[in-house]
Image (cartoon, rainbow, N blue to C red):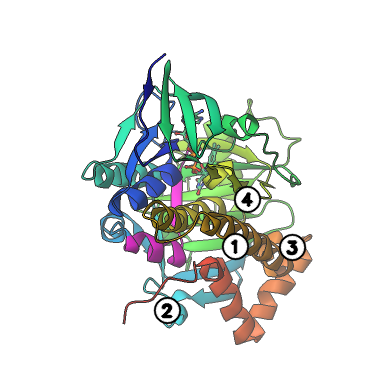
Amino acid sequence: MHTFPSRDRVIVAGAGPVGLTAALALARAGVEVLVLEARDAPDDGERLASASLQPATLDQLAVLGVDRALAALGRRVERLQWRDRTGTIHNQLHMASLAMLTDHPFRLNLDYSRLTAILLSKLARTNARIRFAAEVDGLTDAGGSVRVHAAGEWHSARYLIAADGAASRIRSMVGARPGPTGRPMRLLRLRTPTQLDELLPRLAPLTYVHDEVQPCTVQALPGHWLVTLPIPDTTAEGPLTRAQMGALARRAIALGPGHRLKVAHARWHSSASSLLRSYRYGHVLFAGDAAHVLPDLGDDLGLNAGLQGAVDLGRVLAAVMGAAASPAALEDWSQRRSTSLARHLRALAGTCPNAAPTHDAALDRVRAMNSDRDAGHAWLTRSALLPLQPLTYARSA
Ligand SMILES: Cc1cc2nc3c(=O)[nH]c(=O)nc-3n(C[C@H](O)[C@H](O)[C@H](O)COP(=O)(O)OP(=O)(O)OC[C@H]3O[C@@H](n4cnc5c(N)ncnc54)[C@H](O)[C@@H]3O)c2cc1C
C-alpha cells in the first residue's frame, strides 16, 4: 500500500471556513499543507445564509490579509438595537465605541459562500494543495506523526488538523467525546429582498426584536435582509409554506398591514452546543465546529470563535513546525482556547439578553445596559469577541 511521504507537512481535514483559514495561516508561514475535503467541490454555502464577522475575527483575518477582500463584499454594521414589536426602542449601542480596542469597530455581514470563496482564492496563491472527494476515513497516530487515509490512499504528516465540522468522524477515530451538550436550538432563517429599514422607522442593521411569544433577530446584508426566528421543537418543519414563513416573520417584526415580506430563501438550522474538553489528542488538533458547537445567540459565535481559533492555531503550529516553539506550545494553545471559550460562554450566560431565561429578564438586561454605559460597553466588547482575541494580537498603530 502506497503512503505519500510526510516531509514536514500538516494535513487539514475539511475545507470549511475554519479548515481553509488554518491552512492559509500555515501556508503563509511557509508550512507545507495538504487539505483533504470530503465534498466533490467547494461548499457553495447553500445550507447557510450569512456570516456576521465580529471585530476580533476581522482583526485576526487582517493578519492573513483577507479582511479587505471581505470588506468589499460585505455590509458594515455599526449600530445595534433592541426593540419590541410595538416599535419601542429599548437600547442602541454604537460599535464606534470599540475603536480603542480594535482596528475593525464594526461587524461585517456577508453571504457565507463569499467567505469560503475568498479563502480559497487566497489559498490558491500559496503552495497549499487541496484535494476534493477525499473524505478522511482512517487514521493512525504513532511515532511522532500521523497517517491519514482518504480516497483509498494513505498520507502522512507531522500533525492533522481536524476541521471536519460538527459531525466530526475524526473525533470518534481518536476517542474524543464532546462535553455537556446544551439544549438544542431550532432556528428558521429567512432571506428577504424587502428593504426592512424602509418599512420600519429607525431599524438598525442588526436588531434584536424582543417578544414573549416570538422573538427574532433582523440583520442587513448586501442587497437583502435576514430574519432569524427561534422556533420551538414542537412546531413541525415540513408543513410551513414560504407564505406562512413570511407571515410568521411579518408578525414577529410587526410589519404593518399592506406590507408584504417576500421570502427569497428559507433554511432550518438546529444545533445543540457541545465542547471538547481538550483540542489536542496526540498529533491531532481540533478546530471549529469539530471542537465546539456554540449556542446561537444572534452573533454567529461558533463561526467567529472557529475562525479566530484557526488563525491562532496556525500561528502556534507554524512555530512548532519551524522549531521556534516546542510541541508543548500546542498543549498550551488547547488549554488557553478551551478555557477562554468556557469563560466567555459563562459571561454571556450571565449578561447577554439573548441568553436570558425569560422575556422579562432579557428586557431587564437590555435596560440595565441603557442605564449603565460601562455595562453596555462591556457587553459590546464581549459580543465583539475581543476577550477571545489571542494575547499576541497587536493592534496597528
Ligand atoms: C444548517 C446550518 C445553518 C447554519 N447557519 C449559520 C449561519 O447562518 N451563520 C453562522 O455563522 N453559522 C451557521 N451555522 C454554523 C456554521 O456552519 C459553522 O459554525 C461553521 O461552518 C463552522 O465551520 P467549520 O469549518 O468548523 O465546519 P464546516 O463548515 O461544517 O466544514 C467542515 C468541512 O469538513 C468536511 N468534512 C466533513 N467530514 C470530513 C472528513 N471525514 N474528511 C474530510 N472532510 C470532511 C465537510 O464536507 C465540510 O466542508 C450553520 C450550521 C448549519 C448546520
Identified at 68% across, 65% down, the residue is 343
Spatial CA distance of label 4 from label 3 is: 16 Å
Q: Is the residue at mark 4 in contact range of ligand 1, meaning its CB lies under 8 Å from it?
A: yes
Mark 4 neighbour class, 10 Å CA radius: few under 14, some 14 to 19, many 20 or more: many
Where residue 8 sits: x, y (%)? 36, 42
Q: Callout 3, which amino acid?
A: Ala
Identified at 56% across, 48% down, the residue is 228
Mark 2 neighbour class, 10 Å CA radius: few under 14, some 14 to 19, many 20 or more: few
Out of 319 and 293, give the one closest to the viewer: 319
- Mark toward the start of the polypeptide (3 vs 2): 2
Camera-side mark, 1 or 4 = 1
- Mark toward the start of the polypeptide (1 vs 4): 4
Q: Is residue 2 above or below residue 264?
A: above
- Mark toward the start of the polypeptide (4 vs 3): 4
Out of 100 and 307, give the one closest to the viewer: 307
Spatial CA distance of label 4 from label 2 is: 27 Å
- Mark toward the start of the polypeptide (3 vs 1): 1
What segment is highlighted magenta in the picture? 48-63
In the image, 318: left or right of 273?
Answer: left
Mark 3 neighbour class, 10 Å CA radius: few under 14, some 14 to 19, many 20 or more: some
Q: Callout 1, which amino acid?
A: Arg
- Mark toward the start of the polypeptide (1 vs 2): 2
> SS class of the residue under badge 2?
helix
Give the residue number, with chain letter if any, for mark 1: 336
Give the residue number, with chain letter if any, for mark 3: 356
Q: Is residue 379 above or below residue 344?
A: below
Identified at 55% across, 44% down, the residue is 286
Question: Answer yes or no: do the residues labelled 4 and 2 have beta carbons within 8 Å?
Answer: no
Q: Callout 4, which amino acid?
A: Leu
Give the residue number, with chain letter if any, for mark 4: 294
In the image, is residue 53 part of the stretch drawn in magenta? yes
Give the residue number, with chain letter if any, for mark 2: 96
